[in-house]
């Protein structure tokens, strides 16, 4: 048999096999055609959704936070646009060199960057860095790394920095308030983000803006009662005093006596709210409203007010403070220097502990407690500031005689500096306690009457004597203005005991005394440079701040311009009883 014959017999196939293969091919074609008709004719929505899922995205549109302004419209907190870098982990396509360059721009370690990208592969959105400045964001865009994107956000900026830090507070990376006014008015200031539907290419770039889903709503602006000029002045003078006396800290509050508005509120040490990387927790809290202290002799005017209101005493009533000590049970109240017989007015001027104690003990405990309670001690000031404390005023039913006596000169009671400043408004407004406001007031409130005008004016006259030569605070005088005020020097309470060498020095006063416009309170905690009396540590701060603030507000002088030097001779001051 020839080879051709053998080959032909080996390749011949049965006809049914060819027909089977043809049939299978036609069946497969029919199935594919049917599937195509089904998907494109019946499941059109399904295919559209799948396509949109790959290319359509809903993008959030950030809304900026409201601006915080001072009473004259000057910005204290503004939002500036920044870029944030994010990735879709499953879509990142970058080589080692690209990752190294990206890490350098973001100021991150390369390994940290890789870990950040890979630790959540199931997510579609992972932040790499928030709040990049424009120049850094531009460098990220130049790298053109697939799967790495930029998103517009807003970052808070505080033009006044440390000077207003404790009052304004700050926001976190999500632009939510964390402290101060930013926290107290979070809902008012916070903007509501918008959204829109866009088409992105495979690199994540927006190629078409399809639809606006929700318009962004910016936050509302907030106008505070604060005067930025007075705020800066108060912070500067307080900082100088804390440094001069090597004190642990200091606080100051300046109020408009006619409206109760807070014109300035500052603490030292402070922090920079624009860069909080070095800020310690102890520096962040607003000590003027969150820390309570024993006010010392700054409380004596309220003891005198209670005594005058009772009808048992008049400004000229004589009180025997001899021999310079007063024994009450097992304890003894002392004056640093024997004063002999003093009038009630001289008790305030000389700051006699014995004189104050004798007046307090002549009153029913309830009467003294009632006066202290009515002027706001023991309850928060109502400022609405986050973390504000109420201080401590114990129920009069639990007072022992020695406690009633020591409370008359500011021991056994604790207050905040804001409470103390507010309480002094009763002497500035002829007996009306003014409500505290951190927002600008359009219609001045009338205040709550808590003392008779006669008593309030009588105490104010006594406070004016305390600032004159022979009083405890001649250093509080202001050229061209009559000043009324009171010093306070108290041993500091540490661990339930009074530390013999730690003091709290304070001064609270008002001007012009003929018709007070401003009330200011200063507290210096633990001065360590030798001097610790309120008249030499806190009073000079009051004088410099009050002088500048009165000029800024164009308050007319009410005293001769040749009334004496601004810096009083220390020999004119009477040492306060501690």
Image (spheres, rainbow, N blue to C red):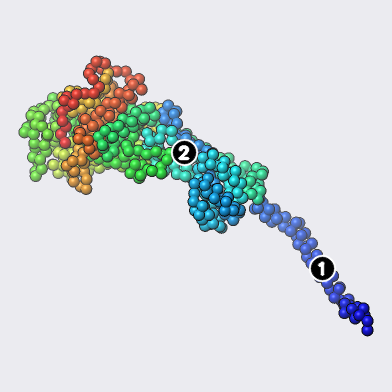
Quarter occupied by the N terminus: bottom right
Residue 439 in view of the camera = yes
Q: What residue is shown at x 55% (from left), y 48% (from top)?
A: 101
Labelled pair 2, 1 in contact (Cβ < 8 Å): no
Q: Position of residue 495 (x, y in %)?
A: 21, 48
Q: Is residue 352 above or below residue 186?
A: above
Q: Which residue is mark 2?
A: 156
Q: Is residue 352 left or right of residue 64?
A: left
Residue, far left:
323
Residue 435 in view of the camera = no
Q: How many marks?
A: 2
Q: Position of residue 226 (x, y in %)?
A: 38, 30
Q: Position of residue 350 (x, y in %)?
A: 15, 28
Q: Quadrant of residue 361?
A: top left
Q: Which residue is mark 1?
A: 25
Q: What residue is shown at x 76% (from left), y 60% (from top)?
A: 36
Q: Is residue 208 left or right of residue 126?
A: right
Q: What residue is shown at x 43% (from left), y 39% (from top)?
A: 274
| Front-lying residue, 331 or 23 | 23
* Earlier-in-chain disc, 2 versus 1: 1
| Front-lying residue, 253 or 220 | 253
């Amino acid at each position: 048999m020839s080879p051709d014959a053998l080959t032909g017999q080996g390749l011949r196939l049965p006809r049914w096999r060819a027909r089977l293969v043809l049939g299978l091919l036609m069946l497969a074609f029919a199935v594919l055609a049917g599937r195509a008709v089904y998907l494109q004719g019946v499941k059109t929505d399904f295919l559209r959704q799948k396509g949109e899922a790959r290319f359509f995205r809903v993008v959030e549109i950030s809304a900026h936070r409201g601006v915080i302004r001072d009473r004259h419209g000057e910005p204290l907190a503004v939002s500036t646009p920044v870029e944030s870098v994010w990735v879709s982990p499953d879509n990142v396509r970058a080589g080692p060199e690209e990752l190294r360059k990206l890490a350098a721009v973001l100021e991150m370690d390369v390994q940290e960057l890789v870990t950040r990208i890979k630790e959540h592969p199931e997510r579609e959105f992972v932040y790499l860095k928030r709040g990049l400045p424009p120049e850094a964001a531009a460098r990220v865009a130049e790298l053109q790394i697939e799967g790495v994107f930029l998103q517009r956000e807003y970052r808070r900026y505080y033009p006044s920095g440390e000077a207003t830090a404790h009052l304004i507070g700050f926001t976190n990376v999500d632009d939510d308030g964390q402290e101060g006014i930013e926290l107290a008015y979070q809902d008012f200031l916070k903007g509501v983000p918008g959204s829109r539907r866009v088409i992105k290419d495979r690199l994540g770039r927006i190629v078409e803006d399809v639809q606006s889903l929700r318009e962004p709503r910016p936050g509302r602006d907030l106008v505070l009662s604060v005067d930025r000029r007075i705020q800066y002045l108060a912070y500067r003078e307080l900082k100088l005093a804390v440094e001069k006396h090597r004190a642990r800290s200091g606080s100051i509050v300046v109020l408009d006596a006619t409206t109760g508005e807070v014109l300035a509120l500052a603490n030292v040490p402070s922090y920079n709210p624009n860069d909080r990387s070095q800020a310690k927790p102890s520096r962040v809290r607003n000590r003027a409203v969150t820390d309570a202290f024993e006010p010392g002799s700054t409380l004596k005017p309220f003891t005198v007010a209670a005594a005058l209101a009772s009808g048992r005493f008049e400004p000229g009533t004589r009180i025997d403070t001899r021999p310079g000590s007063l024994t009450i049970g097992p304890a003894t109240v002392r004056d640093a220097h024997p004063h002999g017989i003093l009038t009630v007015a001289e008790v305030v001027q000389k700051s006699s502990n014995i004189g104050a104690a004798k007046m307090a003990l002549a009153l029913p405990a309830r009467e003294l407690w009632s006066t202290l309670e009515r002027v706001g001690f023991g309850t928060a000031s109502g400022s609405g500031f986050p973390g504000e404390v109420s201080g401590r005023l114990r129920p009069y039913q639990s007072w022992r005689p020695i406690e009633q006596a020591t409370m008359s000169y500011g021991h056994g009671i604790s207050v905040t500096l804001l409470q103390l400043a507010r309480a002094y408004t009763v002497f500035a407004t002829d007996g009306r306690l003014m409500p505290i406001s951190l927002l600008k007031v359009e219609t001045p409130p009338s205040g709550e009457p808590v003392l008779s005008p006669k008593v309030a004016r009588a105490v104010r006259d006594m406070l004016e004597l305390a600032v004159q030569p022979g009083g405890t605070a001649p250093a509080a005088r202001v050229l061209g203005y009559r000043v009324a005020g009171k010093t306070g020097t108290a041993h500091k309470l540490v661990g339930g005991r009074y530390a013999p060498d730690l003091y709290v020095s304070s001064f609270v006063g008002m001007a012009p005394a003929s018709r007070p416009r401003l009330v200011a309170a200063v507290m210096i905690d633990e001065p360590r440079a030798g001097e610790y009396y309120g008249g030499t540590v806190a009073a000079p701060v009051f004088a410099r701040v009050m002088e500048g603030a009165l000029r800024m507000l164009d308050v007319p002088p009410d005293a001769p311009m040749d009334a004496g030097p601004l810096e009083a001779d220390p020999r004119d001051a009477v040492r306060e009883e501690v």
